[in-house]
Image (spheres, helix red, strand yellow):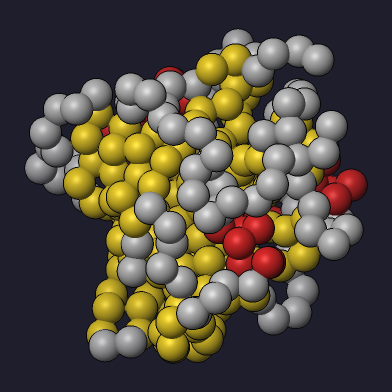
């Protein structure tokens, strides 16, 4: 079936959340990619979601703050860390749109191990840094474990004016209310997410050097990316639920 409508607010609410975390700030860099190349990286029961015949790969640097697990208070040191993910856009057999992560670099080892074991997410332990000076935001990441070792990304952007009315492509890339994943053992699953409407800004890339997209199984991107910035949102993430076979 076709995908559900793209909506600025969650299509359905998360019941009891497993994780609550703030994504502050977040940068969205995107390039078009051939849907056939993305299809082989999808969990079983999912296919690439497309916009005007193309799907997209995203490089998303951010800072995770105030992580809470099952309502417990944030744990010092472990509840704030830098992250950078590579993601694709998916739709399952029920038409529910989502995200598929090819990799998620994080500078804290414990969250890496927990996310791998519980959600089957391809987290990687990396040496990372984040700096903010006025309108400039800079992320740097070098992968430690697991490989390929030395996969890296360096991103520096300058933030511009707010987007008063995000265009349909911006909505397609950011209004995502689930992740699709392959659980340990091989079953496909979906985990719902819920957060406020993204406050998006225009942005420009000042520096960009990365090898994590190619390390995730796609060709290195070509051309200038589509760029957006957000000061962030606080998200609730539900438990992984196995996809029904259709």
Position of 98 with respect to 159 (left or right) is right
x and y, in percent, of residue 30 in the image: 64, 67
Which is more toward the observer, 107 or 2? 2
Q: In the rendered image, which quarter is residue 156 located in? A: bottom left
Residue 145 visible: no
Q: What residue is at 68 percent from the left and 66 percent from the top?
A: 169
Residue 102 place in picture, x, y as percent: 62, 44
Instruction: Tell me residue 124's x, y (percent).
Output: 46, 42
Image-quadrant location for residue 2? top right
200 relative to 145, above or below: below
Query: In this view of the protein, which residue sits in the foreground, 192 or 9?
Result: 9
Find residue 72 and report its horizontal and vertical position in percent: 15, 27
Q: Nearer the viewer, residue 125 or 10?
A: 10
Count every numbered label the image shows and give the total: 0
Q: Is residue 143 left or right of residue 71?
A: right
Picture residue at 53% right of the left edge, 55% below the top: 8
Q: Assign the N terminus to one quadrant of the image.
A: top right
Q: Quadrant of the C terminus?
A: top right
- Residue at the spot x=56%, y=47% of the render? 176
**Left or right placement of residue 232 versus residue 190 in this view:** left
Specify the quadrant of the image occupied by residue 23.
bottom left
Does residue 67 show up? yes
Q: Is residue 188 left or right of residue 78?
A: right
């Amino acid at each position: 079936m076709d995908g559900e409508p793209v909506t600025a607010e969650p299509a359905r609410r998360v019941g009891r959340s497993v994780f609550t975390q703030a994504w502050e700030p977040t940068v969205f860099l995107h390039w078009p990619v051939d849907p056939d190349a993305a299809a082989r990286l999808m969990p079983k029961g999912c296919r690439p979601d497309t916009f005007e015949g193309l799907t997209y790969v995203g490089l998303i640097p951010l800072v995770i703050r105030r992580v809470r697990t099952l309502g417990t208070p944030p744990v010092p040191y472990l509840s704030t860390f830098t992250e950078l993910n590579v993601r694709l856009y998916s739709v399952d057999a029920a038409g529910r749109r989502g995200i598929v992560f090819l990799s998620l670099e994080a500078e804290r080892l414990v969250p890496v191990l927990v996310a791998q074991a519980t959600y089957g997410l391809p987290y990687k332990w990396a040496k990372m840094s984040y700096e903010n000076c006025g309108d400039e935001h800079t992320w740097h990441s070098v992968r430690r474990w697991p490989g390929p070792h030395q996969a890296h990304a360096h991103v520096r952007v300058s933030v511009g004016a707010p987007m008063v009315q995000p265009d349909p492509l911006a909505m397609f890339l950011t209004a995502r209310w689930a992740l699709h994943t392959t659980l340990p053992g091989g079953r496909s699953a979906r985990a719902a997410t819920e957060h406020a409407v993204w406050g998006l800004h225009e942005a420009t890339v000042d520096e960009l050097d990365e090898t994590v997209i190619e390390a995730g199984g796609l060709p290195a991107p070509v051309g200038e990316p589509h760029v957006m910035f957000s000061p962030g949102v606080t998200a609730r993430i539900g438990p992984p639920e196995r996809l029904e076979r259709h």
